[in-house]
Structure formats: structure tokens, C-alpha cells
Amino acid sequence: MQTDIAISRAAILKPINEIAATLSIPPQAVEPYGHFKAKIDLSRVPATGKQGKLILVTAINPTPAGEGKSTTSVGLADALNRIGKRAILCLREPSLGPCFGTKGGAAGGGYAQVVPMEDINLHFTGDFHAITSAHNLLAAMIDNHVHWGNALDIDVRRIVWRRVLDMNDRALRDIAQSLGGPANGYPRESGFDITVASEVMAILCLASDLEDLEARLGRIVVAYTRGKQPVTARDLKADGAMAVLLAQAVKPNLVQTLEGNPAFVHGGPFANIAHGCNSVIATRAALGLGDYVVTEAGFGADLGAEKFFDIKCRQSGLKPSAAVIVATVRALKMNGGVAKADLGIADPEAVRRGGVNLARHIENVRQFGVPAIVAINKFSTDTEAELEVIREIAAAQGSEAILCTHWADGGVGAQALAEKVAELCDHATPQFAPLYDDGLSLFDKINTVATRIYRAEEAIADPGVHAQLKRWEDAGFGALPVCMAKTQYSFSTDPAKLGAPTGHVVPVREVRLSAGAGFVVAICGEIMTMPGLPRVPAAESIRFGANGEIEGLF
Ligand code: ADP
């Protein structure tokens, strides 16, 4: 099989206007970026009154390589179109950092990709640069405010707004800034996060429109005064200029799949300290234009699906009709204790042992009132005996596992899945409800996720964490949902506890307020908000080949 980039390059793309026309988007709403990408000006798209069915693609706890959620989302959207359904795909935009690190691109894979792959992975329509600029404008305005007399009485030891950059650069994690004398401001410690970890990114992805975006930007808490009162972006009068910088970024990006079906690729927040889903604006637009909308959430269902339901759907009022849980033989084997190097050896019993992981994710998704179906993303090393075990595990949960070969075959390989998903959407009455009520205390919300989704005995925290949560409740932030940040490899906070661990506790190390995004982050374990590059970064093999085409972007 060819590499992802070779497959994507061989594709004959349709002009983006043609893709927009298939959705009846009027030409005046299409703002082309080159020939194959466009921003859609939703103010020029007439309301259809339509409400398509929303399908979430999520997964079991992943292996380090990812389980193929994006690939399966693309395959499913193509397959739905193949069986005559008007389906639109909604994905996240990839970050530059991982492209040059270990993970490679993030536009699906094999014959289930969104294209143009190089553009989507590298700069795309500039959204991340706009977010970086808006974020750093606010950072500059904080230091500037302090420099010119600090009328707001900002405690420079309690500035919580760092700077961002869309690159993996460990050198910038912790920095001393404003050195060099009085003209350069007050020296203090700070640091950089990767752009996808910016609260501005989460805000862009949760805002319902430009107006809501500006209101949320204004609510960002950037620092505390010497009297411990929150200082916001609005206090600094930064919200208006930040919104202006984001005016283009807020418009969803339209591209196509390899099979010429429409895809919105818009926004890409971290899935740990943020909620890990594409923008609400894109999802809503797609629901108004298509009959079925396929979207994905980051990491496994314990993190991604929970936040999709409890943060994105809660805030936006979206009601998903079905969920697809992507499982692979190799990830289940890993969950069953097989070492990475041995994943190629057939071992149905290990699949069975690891299957407890899949079973728990199916149960969990159902807790939200959403019917779940399992997509087996087939790898060439899978054996029939191993695949059969997955079918048995799903059946034992009253669900069904469908073998999918979209990576090797394109949409036709996910047609059986598409039939089942369409049937679920059309015939099951969805009973979606978030896991907990807004009125529960912040710590009880954390504890609810820990016990009901992670199946921990309890969540625990130091008195300092409890006191902080109490202060936020007193300040009026108590109704916000919680955003859990923990390892994606395990239901527990220990990445080595695979399968379906029980008896663990979830220690909350730190809590952070994302008042603009509208959630309280509970950090459980070491969470990296500025990744580093590996010993041999992918960047070393990315170059122009003899014919001027990009090589090494897999
Ligand atoms: P996720 O969304 O879960 O992170 P992706 O869909 O981005 O995963 O896929 C991760 C990588 O795995 C991609 O490089 C993709 O080409 C590859 N991949 C996905 N499915 C398969 C498969 N069935 N066989 C081989 N490689 C696959």
C-alpha cells in the first residue's frame, strides 16, 4: 500500500466551488483559499431549517499511534454518501507541532483522507496563526498594562496567561521574561504552551458566532489582583481586538474527502486541558446543510466522548443520535497486556483480555443515552479469530461490531457500518443527556466523571484544590462543566493500568479556570501543554523531492 501522502497526491480533486454547490451553499458565501479550500461565510448561507443527525466517532483507549478515529470518520462519511445519504464530515484541524514530531499528519489515512493533505497539515487557512496572534496580543497587553502603571493592581506573581506557539519546543516551557532593564517591563517567570492548548482555541471551538466569541474572549481570566480578585481580558480592553484578529478564523473551512465528499475541518483544541472537538460553528453549519454529520472527539471515549457530551453538547444544545466506537485488534491486544513489539503475532486470547476495555466504553457511551456501535478498523495483520472475539464482546454488550476496511478500500469498505449507523439514527429515539447537572458542586462533577466513567473509587484532592474550587463557586463559576485532563492510555490516571481497571482513585493535582471557554480544568497527573520533539523528529525527513513535491509528510 502507498503512503498517505502518495495516495492523497494521486487524487483528482474537484474545485472547491463544486463541493460547496453540492451543499447548495451560494457562491457569494464561498471564500476560496486557492482552488481546493474555502472559508464559508455563514452569514451568506440562507437558513435551511434542517437538522441533520449527528454521529460521534470515538474510540477505545488508544495505542501511542492512534486507533484511526479520523480515518474511520472519513470512511464513514464517504460510505454514507455512497449509500445515498447526504453526509458531511466535521474534523479538527491538525497542529503543526505533531507533524514535525512523531505523529505525522492528521487528515485520516490510506484511502480515507481529507485533501489537500499537505495544505491541511501545514498552515491550512491560517486559523492557528490567527489564534496564536490573538492569544499573544492579550499576553502583550497584560505586560504592557503592568509596565504603564498597573491601574488594575495585577499581582505579577499571579498572572496565569502564558504565551503560545504552534510548534513542539521544550525550550520555551518555562522562561524568564522581561529581562534587560526597566524599559523591558517587570521581570517574571512565565512560559509558552502549544497553540492548540490556548484557551482562545477552545473558545473559538465552543463559540456559537462572532458575537459569542467576543463575549467569551472578554471573560478570560488572565491574572489575579493583590486582593485575589480575577482580572479579565475585558478589564484590559483586549477582547475587541482579539475578536477582530479572529474574524476570518471563525469561518469554517470547507475541503473534500478523497471521494469528493464535503468536509469541514475547523478548530483543533487539545483533548486534555480542553475538550478536543472541532468547532460548534462547523458542526451546526453541517447539520443545517446535510442529513448526517460525522464528527470525532480526541483520545478514547473516557476523555473525548465524555467531553463531547458534557462540554460541547451541553453548551451548544447539540443532540447526538449515535456513537461509533473505533476498536482495533492491536489496541485491544495492548490492553490485554501484549507488548508493542509483539502486536503482529496472532493472539485472540489477548484480544479477549483487552476486550474489557471496549465493553466498558460501550457501557459508558450508553450512560449518555446515545446508542453505540463498534467499528473494527482492520489492519492487515488481524486474523479472523481475533476479529470474531471483538464481535463477541460487542454482542455481549447488546451492541454490534462491524468490520471496516476503509483504510485499504475507501468508503466502500465502511458501507456495512454506514448502513447500520443510518439505521440507528433513523430508528432509535435518542435520549441524550449529559452525565451530571449544572447545579452539582464542581468537585462533585469531577467525582461523578471519576466514578461513573473511569470507575474509580473516588476523586481526591488537597485542601488547596477544594478551597480554589470553592472560591470559583463563590465568584459565580459553579455552574460550569469540568474538563478532565488525564492520560489517554488508561481509564485510570496511571498510563500503565490498561484494560478496565477498578479500585483506583483519581487524584486531582491542580485545577484551572477557563472562564471564556466555559469549563474548569481538573488536572489529574502530568499533562504536557508544550510538547517536545523526539530524538529523531519527523521534520528531519520532510523535504522537497526532485520533482518539487513534499516528501516525508506521512
Ligand atoms: P486517530 O484519529 O485515532 O489519532 P488516525 O485516523 O489519525 O488516528 O490514524 C493514525 C494513523 O494510523 C494514520 O497514519 C493512518 O494512516 C494509520 N491507520 C489508520 N487506520 C489504519 C489501518 N486500518 N491500517 C493501517 N494504518 C492505519
Image: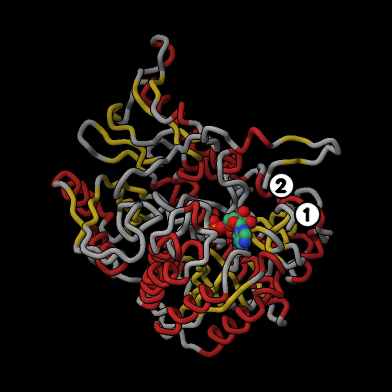
Give yes or no for contact between labels 2 and 1 (Cβ–Cβ under 8 Å): yes
- Residue 66 place in picture, x, y as percent: 52, 56
Relative to the observer, which residue lies in front, 228 or 372? 372
Mark 1 = which residue? 36
Packing grade of label 2 (10 A; few <14, some 14-19, many >=20) is few
Residue drawn 82% across and 61% down? 14
Relative to the observer, which residue lies in front, 36 or 50? 36
- Residue 419 place in picture, x, y as percent: 62, 84
Q: Quadrant of residue 245?
A: top right
Mark 2 = which residue? 119
Residue drawn 68% across and 44% down? 553
Q: Quadrant of residue 412?
A: bottom right
- Residue 40 place in picture, x, y as percent: 69, 58
20 left or right, relative to 101: right
Using the rendered image of the protein, determine whether residue 278 is visible from the camera's viewpoint.
no
Q: Residue furthest bottom?
A: 427
The quadrant of the image that shows the N terminus is bottom right
Relative to the observer, which residue lies in front, 281 or 172? 172
